[in-house]
Amino acid sequence: MTWTLLWCMMAPVRSDLPSGTVTFLFTDIEGSTKLLGELGAVAYTEALLEHRRVLREAFARHGGVEVGTEGDSFFVAFPTAPGALAAAEQGQETLTQGPIIVRMGMHTGTAYLAGEEDYVGEDVHLAARIAAAGHGGQVLVSKETRQMVEAELTDLGEHRLKDFERPVGIFQLGSKRFPPLKTISNTNLPRPASSFVGREREVAEVVSLLGDGARLLTLTGPGGSGKTRLAIEAAAELVPEFKAGVFWVGLAPLRDPALVTDDIAHTLGAKDGLADHVGDRELLLLLDNLEQVIEAAPELSALVEACPNLKLLVTSRQLLRVKGELEYPVLPLAEPEAVELFCTRAGVEPDQAVNQLCRELDNLPLALELAAARAKVLSPAQILERLGTRLDLLRGGRDAETRQQTLRATIEWSYELLSVEERTLFARLSVFRSGCTLEAAEQVAQADLDTLQALVEKSLLRHAEDRFWMLETIREYATERLEESGEDDELWRQHAEWFLALAEEAEPNLHGSGRTAEWLDRLEREHDNLRAALDWLEASGERERALRLAGAVSWFWAMRGHLVEGRRRLEGALRCAQRPTAARAKALIGAATMAFEGGDTATARFRAEEGLALHRALGDAWGTAYSLYELGDAVANDGDLARAQQLLEESVRVFRELGDHHHTLLAARMLAQVYYSLGHRERARELHEDNLRQARTRSDEFIEATTLGQLAMIAIDEGRAQDAVSMLKEAHFIWRDLGNLIGTVAGLCRLAVSLSLTGEAGTAVRLLSCSAALREEIGYHSSWLTAMNEETLTAIRTQLDETAFAEAWEQGQTLTADEAVALALDSSY
């Protein structure tokens, strides 16, 4: 059940309530309705009375004051946190002898008394929410209470609770295992900033349909009808029901249906077999805005068919029309809800004009939001007067969907209220995907700050942090206006040029510049724009510039784990542009890197050899040196160590002659690995140690981290496990700051090697499991890492039985990289 502050209104007038810092305790019987049916009214009444007697005795013994009861629940206040915890523990122990099972939750905070009869405030509400998240027999404790008691408490982590903006730390009394808390944590669902108004019935119906067996449920309706918000709210209700979680995949920026399953896989951390990754997991996916990539529908249907416990909740302007699909039309708001939404957003009181305005807008949420924006300067009656004729004037043809006509009319009305300058900028901004910076808007769309601000104030443009962006429905309308203007080709050209320039400016900063993390973050924010620029260049026949752009962002794709998409993009660009140019040569380097990191060493070797030949033909010394490095890496992986040594020594020499310190160290690091494999171990160690000194002197974090990883492996070979752990810890935090997932994965695997050799097999399994999840997420399948992991697993299986191994592996799947490293450090010292 849900507790609310109704407790406050039920308590009699009293003066015995604790004041100051108080611990609030809530209890509730689990499955009371079912228990009543099983026991019968008489036996259940007796059990209920005994439950109340037992709990009241425990509460009184430890200083608790009963604030109120509601049905089968208690609300009790304690002057001390230890008293509250002791009472809860005593009550639970006594109740184990009877049929009633109770969940309890507590939180310590400041007591605010409304007169002398009740408590009010957020702390009371938080205690109730914590209790509601638990299960029968479980006692949950907030972080604030935890800090005031000494007891065996299990840290359950931070959880999101309904109506609370920030995550809440929750602990459990004792170590007994219970199902996942009934919170909204196991999800990446967006957290809308605005309040959710109405739609309670629709949320319940969507939840019921998915709970009653619907496997593929599509919410249909026009843009602006509230499909996305309804889906998010319904999905949030279902988080506790899906053991593997509920995940949102936003598809609005996509235009290529082939990217749909890639985006799903990236969200889930799956690679090379989405269906295999999902398997039997109990999982709900919310696929948002599918209509523009509807051709992916058959693939989604096949995914559902292959995965028995997977359910899809889809929002789309049209049906998928595939087997097993169930449609749920998202209708306009009921009039009372529409009025409430408008008044909440506009800050006005309801009256007849508001009622009429909502009806004229067909009670569509987005239309109401846009109209409410005008309430700053117009009364509802004035808005209605200006709206009426435009609605009639702008209706579409008779064969068009009515709600789509109405929404278009609403957006058209907002558009016609703009000045000429605002209209022009509004249309031009539609070329950006996932928003843009002020600088990009100024350069590509010739924006000025005043006009941008005007569009933000009129709710046609949004601004968050350093980015401007449009709701997708509004952006599509703006795209139509751009096409009508005849400026679209020129705007897209400027857009592509801007992001090509950005990518080429970023590229040298991704190689040991000291600003690597900053530039990687910037490219991540612009990834959808980079994709759009590539799409336009390819569609426009600008093959050479498409190749330049793909080559320039290849290192970003590699470092940030976009390996699958990056490889496909590069290979596609190389097929389309085969002239022996500098752009092709650069793209070949990127393609070799992508193939190698993806475990395809044959393709990596082929592309590196082609790149080497082309760079030499072009007289590009730097490209030649890098191709030598890539080829040396590939042939070393294939076991041709003698040739690898020759290639890498030449690479080091050329980079050194060019004065490129970062890449000299990069190639020297790989050369040291080859020396080590050839048995020249002291020579390898000296080279690694010299690289590390130089990297630290030059603040080259990438080289520092990679070299620490190699020195750690040497330490492991020499039996210096503790030294290895220290170096890997240092490397991990560098990789984390750089956002380099490949380095993070490799570091976890190396830590697992160290732990497996020191008797910490269980922890080693957890680290390998965590790294495996990350590898799947980014598509990293390096053959050397796979071989190392297989050796580690062989050693581990001699130390653990299958049950212990399976349990440790499952635990590792839930760890973050930082948690895994902390676990390794705890085991090592």
Image: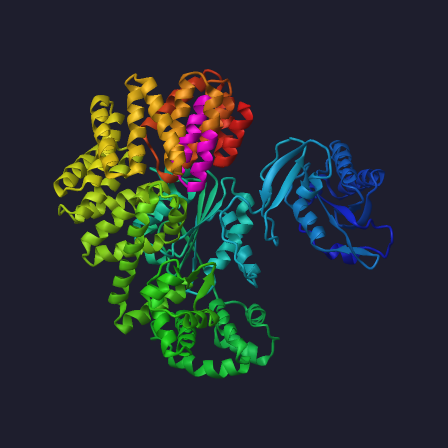
Residue shown at 31% from the left, 25% from the top: 672
Q: Which residue reaches farthest right?
A: 15
Q: Is residue 103 visible?
A: no
Quarter in which the C terminus is drawn: top right
Colour scheme of the picture: rainbow
Asked if the magenta segment contains residue 418, the reply would be: no
Residue at position x 32%, y 29% in the image: 669
- Occupied quadrant, residue 640: top left
Please state the extent of the stretch shown in magenta in the rendering: 728-754
- What is the x, y in percent for residue 279? 41, 36
- Horizontally, residue 160 falls left or right of residue 302, namely right
Residue 363 image offset from top left, x and y in percent: 50, 71
Q: Is residue 345 above or below residue 377?
A: above
In the rendered image, residue 736 lying in the magenta stretch gets the answer yes
**Residue 504 in sight:** yes
Left or right: 147 in relation to 498:
right
User: Residue 48: percent from the left, percent from the top?
Assistant: 77, 42
Image label count:
0
Report the front residue among 419 and 362. Answer: 419
Task: Using the image as rendered, state which of residue 507 and residue 700 is in the foreground.
Answer: 700
Look at 42% across and 26% down and name the residue there: 750
Q: Is residue 759 above or below residue 649?
A: above
Q: Quadrant of residue 753?
A: top left
Against 776, residue 263 (above or below) is: below
Q: Is residue 4 left or right of residue 177?
A: right
Residue 234 locus on image (x, y percent): 52, 53
Q: Main secondary structure of the magenta part?
A: helix
